[in-house]
Image: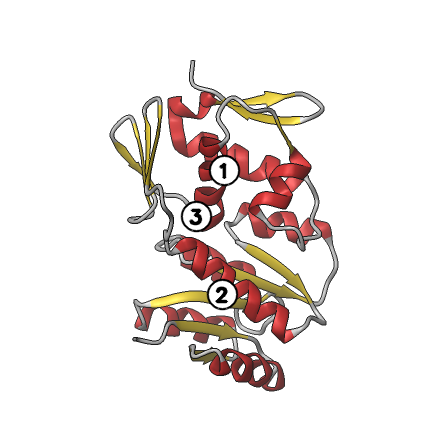
Amino acid sequence: MEKRKVLVVDDESRMRKLVKDFLVRKEFEVLEAQDGSEAVDVFFANKDIALVILDVMMPKMDGWQVCREIRGVSEVPIIMLTARADERDELLGFELGVDEYISKPFSPKILVARVEAILRRSGGATAEKTLTAGKIVMDKAAHEVRADGRVVELSFKEFELLNYFMENQGIALSREKILNSVWNYDYFGDARTIDTHVKKLRSKLGAQGEYIKTIWGMGYKFEVE
């Protein structure tokens, strides 16, 4: 079986080595970059990268700019690392399409577990591989969404969020329940993360974005009229 490639980007060689050692033990192939500029070069030179672990504060080009460059051409899962516990940073990351956000210091074992969980969920291994709701068709195996016949490019987290909505049609879902189900129980984030993703998801779905109803003061409900 071919090893999955993970790009680790951090200007601290000690941090890169720590993360790499834990990933290699789990049979991942690890590519490294020591600054943002090198990260972009490595990413574009390797089209089969499965996931990117990206530090925020780096020389030459910071993590936000690297994320923008990658998101311009790819929806590859991105885990952002930061030493700053600032919720504004976190919200910016999610607006740019970051899939997970981990603050330093962190447990390398937890980081690897997050990597495995993201790749497992994005693999589309599920019993029901196609979901249909109104004019939205989701092919989980191909990781593709069509709205009124048009292919919609979604990030990993946007895809997961839409999948959760479609699997729970007609059910009122609180922000906390969505956060726990889509970002998993060990994610200590702000519920406004949900609003950011819903806004982007609605925009990308066009007219079908109206299927996602806001329940004021509570959360959302996915409903096809």
**Above-or-below relation of 149 to 152:** above
**Left/right of residue 55 with respect to residue 33 in the rendered view:** right
Which sits earlier in the primary sequence, circle 2 or circle 3?
2
- Nearer the observer, 41 or 202: 202
Q: Is residue 5 left or right of residue 36?
A: left
Residue beneath the point at 53% across and 72% down:
60
Calculate the distance from the C-alpha at mark 3 to the C-alpha at mark 1: 14 Å
In the rendered image, the residue lying farthest to the top is 225
| Mark 2 vs mark 3: in front | 2
Residue at the farthest right position: 85
In percent of width and height, residue 80 lies at 58, 62
Crowding around mark 2 (Cα neighbors within 10 Å: few <14, some 14 to 19, many 20+) is some
Write down the residue under mark 1. Answer: 164
Q: Position of residue 183 (x, y in %)?
A: 59, 49
Question: Label 3 belongs to which residue?
Answer: 155
Q: Which is more toward the observer, 3 or 55? A: 3
Residue 69 visible within the image: no
In the rendered view of the protein, which quadrant contains the C terminus?
top left
Give the Cα distance between marks 1 and 2.
Answer: 20 Å
Going from the N terminus, do you reach mark 1 or mark 2 first? 2
Q: Pointer 2 and pointer 3: residues touching (CB < 8 Å)? A: no
Q: Which residue is mark 2?
A: 116
Residue at image coords 41%, 54%: 122
| Nearest to the observer: residue 52 or residue 171 | 171
Does 198 appear above or below 108? above
Kind of residue at badge 2? Glu
- In the rendered view, would you say 39 is above or below 144? below
Dot 1: element: helix
Q: In the image, what residue type sits under mark 3?
A: Ser
Three-letter amino acid code of the residue under disc 1: Tyr
Element at badge 2? Answer: helix
The picture quadrant where one finds residue 138 is top left
